[in-house]
Amino acid sequence: MITTDILIIGAGPTGLFTVFEAGLLKLKCHLIDALPQPGGQCSEIYPKKPIYDIPAYPEILAGDLTQKLIEQSKQFEPGFTLGERAETIEKQEDETFIVTTNKGTKHHAKIVAIAGGLGSFEPRKPLIPNLADFEDKGVEYIIKEPELYRDKKVVISGGGDSALDWAIFLSNIASEVTLIHRRNEFRGALDSVEKVQELKNLGKIRLITPAEVKGILGTDKVTGVAVEKKGENAFIVDADHFIPLFGLSPKLGPIGNWGLSIEKNAIKVDTFDYQTNIPGVYAIGDVNTYPGKLKLILCGFHEATLMCQSAYKRIFPNKKYVMKYTTVGGVDGFDGSRKEAPKAVVKAIE
């Protein structure tokens, strides 16, 4: 059985930053994530997309942010159970918890922090009869590595920000980009719509509206898509890849059966310390909800900080903790490392 002070469910940005904040309090962390690597959505869904609202970073790629958070937390030697989903939770007589994954791995922790983002995600798939036959054979629902599409013919279907942004991005990588939407109007940001129109006029994006993809062509891999355009006969568009971007459907999963107070697929918490209705179980980041909640990474960082302070008081109820700024107290890693600001040289003036 794996033992730890704080068991973090979800290894996205908020979960990773929790390791650092807990480490400052000398609390050990272990993380569970259903994905095969840390990073959450930032690593799995949009690693190459820029984020603009992280303090001190005018722009940073989602994947790079994840790597920096992992690097920051390394000194506190977190443990990881990856590729497994937290399935059940059992509260013990001593107020600790045992969390078991879908693969039977047991974790014993004094505190449980749910940092599962919006939960697990499933792509919304269009109703195309043979779509599933071509998954991983030219049909992708998430763009992880843009270089896969270098000099390829790409058909994107969708009308939101994701479809627009990737059509724009891939127009400089793919040999052909075709964007298909069932309406003439798009739901994305105005500047993205205008950019797609500009690229269409330059011949860098083929825009087909109002239209829908109704079939996939190919044997071992995608060679084209069958398109129905309003007022016209069906026709074929050659393609090496078909990317339907109709969004992702979040699901809370087994955590929804833990007896937590749930509101619209999110966990209700007390804003004092982001504790749930189960004492000792906290929810931070996009997975929680409270009046005025903003689903931003930087808000998750704030919630993680306050949660760790509360967790420390719960684990050590008779111990007083005096917070020291890292610029004053430095940072002592569990790996023996020490980071501190240079000390001023004191010298008497003769």
Image (spheres, helix red, strand yellow):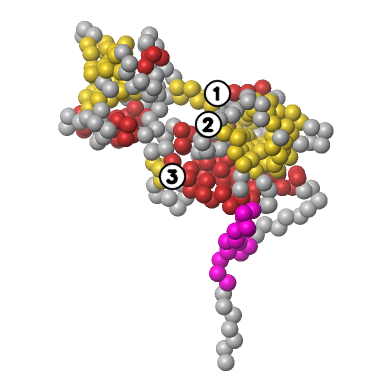
Dot 2, how many residues are within 10 Å of its Cα: few (below 14), some (14-19), or many (20+)? many
Choose the circle earlier in sequence order: 2 or 3.
Answer: 2
Q: Is 264 situated left or right of 221 in this image?
A: right
Q: Is residue 329 magenta?
A: yes
Residue 224 is tagged as none
Q: Is residue 283 magenta?
A: no
Amino acid type, label 3: Asp
Residue displayed at 28% across by 22% down? 240
Give the position of the N terminus as an image quadrant. top right
Q: Which region is colored magenta? A: 326-343
> How far apart are labels 2 and 1 at the CA level?
14 Å
Q: Nearer the viewer, residue 338 or 128?
A: 338
Q: Is 124 situated left or right of 84 in this image?
A: left
Residue 105: x and y in percent read: 66, 30
Residue 35 is tagged as 2
Give the position of the C terminus as an image quadrant. bottom right
**Callouts 2 and 1 close, C-beta under 8 Å:** no
Q: Which residue is mark 1?
A: 251
Amino acid type, label 2: Leu
Q: Which residue is mark 3?
A: 64
Residue closest to the far bottom = 350
Q: Nearer the viewer, residue 309 or 82?
A: 82
Residue displayed at 61% across by 64% down? 328
- Helix, strand or loop at label 3? It is helix
